[in-house]
Image (tube, helix red, strand yellow):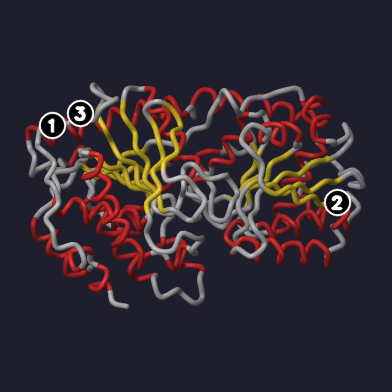
Amino acid sequence: MSNSSLHPSASTPDKPNLVPKASFVEKRTGYPTRQAIALISDHGDPAADIGREEAGGQNVYVRQVGEALAKLGWQVDMFTRKSRTGDPTIVQHSSYCRTIRLTAGPEEFVPRDQLFQHMPQFVEAFRTFQTKEGTNYPLIHTNYWMSAWIGLQLKQTSNIQIVHTYHSLGAIKYRTVLNRPPIAQTRLDIERRILEQANCVVATSPQEQEHLRSLISSQGCVEVIPCGTDLNTFHAIPRAEARAALGFTPHDQIVLYVGRFDPRKGIETLVRAAALLKDKGGRMKDEEKGAGHPSSIPYSSLRLVIVGGSDPDQSDGQERRRIEQIVQELGLAEHTQFVGQVGHDRLPLYYTAADVCVIPSHYEPFGLVAIEAMACGTPVVASDVGGLKFTVIPEETGLLVPPQDTTAFANAIDRLLTDDIWARKLRKQASVRVQQNFSWTGVAVQLSDLYRRLLARSITHPAYVSEPTPQARETAIVSSTSSRTKDLVRAS
């Protein structure tokens, strides 16, 4: 299927409503004084159970940002694709924040690499919803590259501001993939166009901003606004209390993983690292551990706890079966617990009960799990990649090690399990770092400020946003010129 066959104009001949240039206050009944904005997350359902199929950090980000923005005075509508027939079309999270599930393709789980063909239907459904509700969104915040494509289509025919968050970069993902999927080049092209044509792109860490510039384009506006966590939910509680609630003993040495089952999440690396600890009997050779580390203790009480997962017949279910097989082959079955999906209300129990939370991802733009764990006072061992370099401060809130390095992960875990005094210090410092830097309220305040600046500028310069100056190139907003629009039409 060619890209041209996917352009919505081929199937939507009617002219959509243009957003009035200065009419940004929503007039829909029930919300007389709030500005309406839309968050689009094509596959990351904000109302989904975390850990289900491909539900993970993106879902949390959109949901938490949406609810926090609503508390700041916005009317927030979060649009996603309906992936299960029985799911309600609209989920009301609060008085001014809701998830709206649009029909785009079959109402069933579809792997991300096969979703793009359904995005024109998503655009049609979005426009239909606007017409039916009598709602116009002067600003749309898109999440992930397919949502970026949706935003670019809407921007062609409406006076709207587009803000985009990548969540992951194809330019990085495909560097380690031997056989690129057919959709790869389309994704790379759209990731470049959204950076150059959006009114602003939000990078969640300085490392992501650097990657956007070095790997994608030197053009466009980029502002760094980190992810956050819910400090009312994720905070330190007595470890003995958490362990008792989960059935662990005070002597268990708990190594925790939280997240989806995906080969890129590096769970295999963690499992093999745990096996190395067990096989060494907790007495790893000095040359393997490196100088200056205390002697290890026997790991008879080692517990590898894996939280997350989905239905066995789904894609991440296949990865779970693969990991379970590796666990069996390595003789770790008695030391490993596959917990499955866990609600946000119980996740803090697992974080607090753990001695260490491990994030062995091959790449993470930010790493929400890291700040959730740190907020609960749990030190982190993470891959030295992407936004994890920004989130985790080595030797202060955890340790960073080379991705996919089994021995390095085993050594780092061993350090935290065997040096209790140092681990306690890291626990305290980790909690303080999150409290001071990563609240969703703080994130929403920064996003709200960005939105208002863009909307104010669009009123005075509706067809022109800003020209970058040498001093402010990183935060300048590039004009959406007609030549770029034509380029998008040709490429789409």
Q: Reply above or below: 412 against 446.
A: below
Q: Position of residue 81 (x, y in %)?
A: 41, 53
- Tell me the element at label 1: loop
Q: Residues within 10 Å of mark 1 (few under 14, many from 20)?
A: few
Residue type at mark 3: give it.
Lys
Q: CA distance from mark 2 to mark 1?
A: 60 Å
So how many labels did they put on this image? 3
- Tell me the element at label 2: helix
Q: Where's the N terminus, which quadrant?
A: bottom left
Return the residue at label 3: 27
In the depicted view, which residue is nearer to us: 374 or 454? 454
Residue type at mark 1: give it.
Ser
Q: Does 13 sit left or right of 225 as displayed? A: left
Q: Does 367 sit left or right of 261 as displayed? A: left
Return the residue at label 2: 335
**Does the rendering let one see residue 209?**
no
Of badges 1 and 3, nearer the viewer stands 3
Q: Residues within 10 Å of mark 3 (few under 14, many from 20)?
A: some
Return the residue at label 1: 23
Residue at screen point 83% across, 64% down: 328
